[in-house]
Amino acid sequence: MTAATNITLALSKGRIFEETLPLLKAAGIEVTEDPETSRKLILPTNRPDVRVVLVRATDVPTYVQHGGADLGVVGLDVLLEHGGQGLYQPLDLRIAKCRMSVAVRADFDYAAAVKQGSRIRVATKYVSVARDHFADKGVHVDLIKLYGSMELAPLTGLADAIVDLVSTGSTLKANHLLEVERIMDISSRLVVNQAALKLKREAIRPLIDAFAAAIPQE
Ligand code: ATP
Ligand code: MG
């Protein structure tokens, strides 16, 4: 008899945790504590060999890359900024869907600024994606790195535009901002530590297969 291989899954609290639960359930895994009421950062599951660690969304790729977790669920937005080094990315889980877009104050003529070749000041958490996007378009930008509340930047004069995630558009609307360009569709990905995939293949492979079978269709 061989000892069970222990598996650690990194998730972030909030929508990724909530939307991953049904996929876990399909794989026979139930998290036995609620992260919103528990103060624990390591959550047990019904499977003695599987545990969940709760980390910041931006820290998920780092945990998985360095083996602090064997697998993780991370938004494409976060994954692209991280770069994905050392991560096997077997599945688009099609959860936590939104899009990454350019938005401006309603009185800023984005199309005209682009056409005139003006330098545009862009505030964003996603400097790497934004840099690539504007370079592809041949638009000159000064990028301003922010860590949150991007909507505030055009309203205060910090920037002309923002690159941010949009789902319903109600946050933009509430701040009198207009979505002027869609950069890409975003959803969450399963990421796996490459060494763990080799060493713990017999435990991890069935999990990947069960998630694959449970991915929401449209
Ligand atoms: P925090 O809000 O704690 O500062 P965060 O913004 O990184 O951290 P979440 O808001 O939970 O964390 O977002 C986690 C992931 O969910 C994002 O990386 C993105 O992929 C996705 N996401 C973010 N905003 C939306 C949205 N409005 N609609 C759908 N998915 C979103
Ligand atoms: Mg957030």
Image: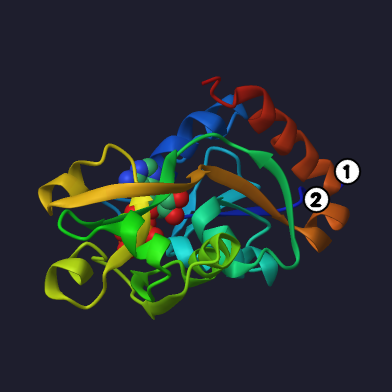
Please name whichever residue, 203 or 1, is drawn nearer the observer in this view of the structure.
203
Image spot of residue 160 (x, y percent): 26, 69
User: Is disc 1 in contact with disc 2, using a CB cutoff of under 8 Å?
Assistant: yes
Q: Is residue 149 left or right of residue 6?
A: left
Q: What number is the disc on residue 60?
A: none
Dot 1, crowdedness within 10 Å: few (<14), some or many (≥20)? few
Q: Is residue 126 left or right of residue 39?
A: right
Please name whichever residue, 58 or 4, is drawn nearer the observer in this view of the structure.
58
Residue appearing at x 21%, y 60% in the figure: 108
Dot 2, crowdedness within 10 Å: few (<14), some or many (≥20)? few
- Residue behind mark 2: 3
Image spot of residue 197 (x, y percent): 81, 53
- Residue behind mark 1: 1
Please name whichever residue, 106 or 113, is drawn nearer the observer in this view of the structure.
113
Residue 32 at least partly seen: no
Image spot of residue 134 (x, y percent): 51, 65
As shown in the figure, which amino acid type bears the numbered disc 2? Answer: Ala
Please name whichever residue, 10 or 154, is drawn nearer the observer in this view of the structure.
154
Q: How many marks?
A: 2
As shown in the figure, which amino acid type bears the numbered disc 1? Answer: Met
Q: Secondary structure at mark 1?
A: loop
Residue appearing at x 53%, y 63% in the figure: 129
